[in-house]
Amino acid sequence: MVSNVFSFATNGIKAFPVNVESDISRGLPDFEIIGLGDASIKESRKRIWTAIKNQCFDFPVGKVIINLAPASMRKVGTTLDLAIAISILTASGVVKPEMLKDTALVGELSLEGNLLPVKGILPMVEEGKKNGVKRFIIPRANVPEGGIVKDVNICGVSNLRQAVAILSDGEKGVYTGEGITSMPELSDINFEFDFGQIAGQHECKRALEIAVSGCHNIIMLGSAGSGKSLLASCVQGIMPPMDYDESYENTAIYSIAGKLEHQSPLSSERPFRRVHGSVTLRGLTGGGRPVRFGEVTLANNGVLFFDEITEADRRVVEALREPLENRTICLSSLGVSETLPADFLFVAAGNPCKCGRLFEGDRNCSCNKAQIKSRLEKLSLPLLERIDMHLIVRGVGFRDMSENIREESSSEIRKRVIKVRTMQKERYKGESFSTNGRMNRQAIEKYCSLSRDSLEFAEEAVKKLNLSMRSFDRLLRVSRTIADMEESLTVQQHHLAEAFQYRAIENVREYM
């Protein structure tokens, strides 16, 4: 007898349906799984055989062949364990085939037959809904995640016997299927780092507020101990909350990556991923088979903070050019290509030279040209052109440290950021973007028109700084954000003047 059970597997950040076919025939006892499964699926034979036995079911005597269709697509992981076990029991007559109508089964089995949580439930349930699945039987721990999808019955079970009881006798498990259509309220979060704890550095705080308000990538270079890393760490506390679509996308990514909190899968808090100059290329971009997400994908819709960027391998730094330009990362391995989302706010910090005092002015730099070049050559001109704001961070003076002045807290700055982001979202309704930092050329011409005086000022500044058109476009985006912060309908000359200040290290070659 041949049985068919519907299940799902993942490929990149997407799920695809898998038809688990079982055939039991006479012959010497054998148990084989075919259909392009990886090592974890091949190993599942003994795990499934033992689970069926320990749940007090008889494993069929004879030749058991399992086919995972479509056989042309590679299946990875342990999500098919439950479907394979139920397929065998259906072919054995324990479960009636008609009870499997419009039902999909996903889950990993332990040797005792208990259901263990698996990765990727959210994209599987979403894809199942598109394919007409009305009921999912999944591990109990994955129920909150599966329940995000509306109009699908999610049945959480603890073990194989309970799954069989639901399919055979109609016994109910833990059901939820109402879906989540709105974000939970974002309460005040006490972040570890707060701008209110930093004395002075008002210019840097202003620049970071502009960067977050318009989603502009920013790099900070300066001496050691000037507060670059601390300033960047505070960015997390002024980021606006995610909307439903952003949170849904990130939940799917973190689900497949196995980094999701099962009890509260949908979160308004944006991810903040921090990498150091010692990060590897694979760790930053991801890759391999199966595909492992890198930091650029885990930071999607959030912040990627690259600390000590001038210490990193140049190949690693140059790999950022694709996600900074396209907001995606394309990975190729064994002839298979995957395009993953990588839309994040990029914040980088580093020392411009070994002693770090290159930009200090009155404190002479003690490094020779070779030492300076070894650091600054990591920052190629094409990379810097893809970063909207360049900031030189200088040390805090003793007076700033000693004066008892109340500094603005991150929560105060965050309120202003949310206000500016809301203005942009309203302005760009119907566009493919919602922030100034994501405007394309046509949008820049439409929303960043300049007066004659401002145009002449911009032309003179572009010639002086020797900016490319790509750099000028990014400068206009920053100007638009500064104007929004002042609630100005037009980009004026002083907005441009401030934006030009944030291109201070456009041409790093002059320091070598």
Image (cartoon, rainbow, N blue to C red):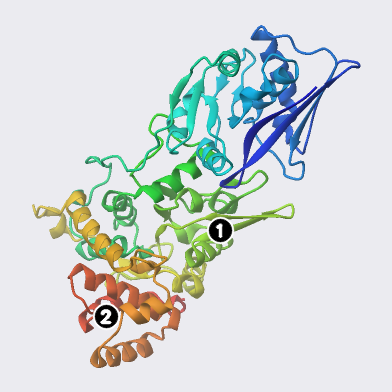
What residue did someone put label 2 on? 496
> Which SS class for mark 2?
helix
- Taking the spot 82% from the left edge, 12% from the top edge, the residue there is 61
Whole-percent x, y for residue 166 in the image: 55, 17
Q: CA distance from mark 2 to mark 1?
A: 32 Å
**Which residue is drawn at the image coordinates 77% and 39% (left, top)?**
36
Q: Are marks 2 and 1 in contact (CB under 8 Å)?
A: no
Please, is residue 354 above or below residue 241 in the view?
A: below
- For residue 55, which quarter of the picture? top right
Residue 233 vs residue 160: left or right?
Answer: left
| Quarter that holds the N terminus | top right
Q: Amino acid at mark 2?
A: Leu
Q: Residues within 10 Å of mark 2 (few under 14, many from 20)?
A: many
Q: Quadrant of residue 397?
A: bottom left
Q: Position of residue 502 (x, y in %)?
A: 31, 73
> Number of marks in the image?
2
Label 1 sits on residue:
329
Residue at the far front: name it: 98
Q: Residue at x 36, y 78 (%)?
A: 444
Q: Earlier in the sequence, mark 2 or mark 1?
A: 1
Quadrant hosting residue 476 = bottom left
**Residue 416, visible in the rendered structure:** yes
Which mark's residue is nearer the viewer, 2 or 1?
1
**Residue nearer the viewer, 152 or 501:** 152
- In front of the other: 485 or 2: 2
Amino acid at dot 1: Ile
Q: In this orientation, does residue 468 appear?
A: no
Q: Is residue 214 left or right of residue 281?
A: left
Q: List x then y, in percent, for residue 219.
A: 38, 64
Horizontally, residue 512 falls left or right of residue 37, namely left
Sort mark 1 into few (<14), some (14-19) or many (20+) by Cα contacts within 10 Å: many
Relative to 354, residue 50 above or below: above
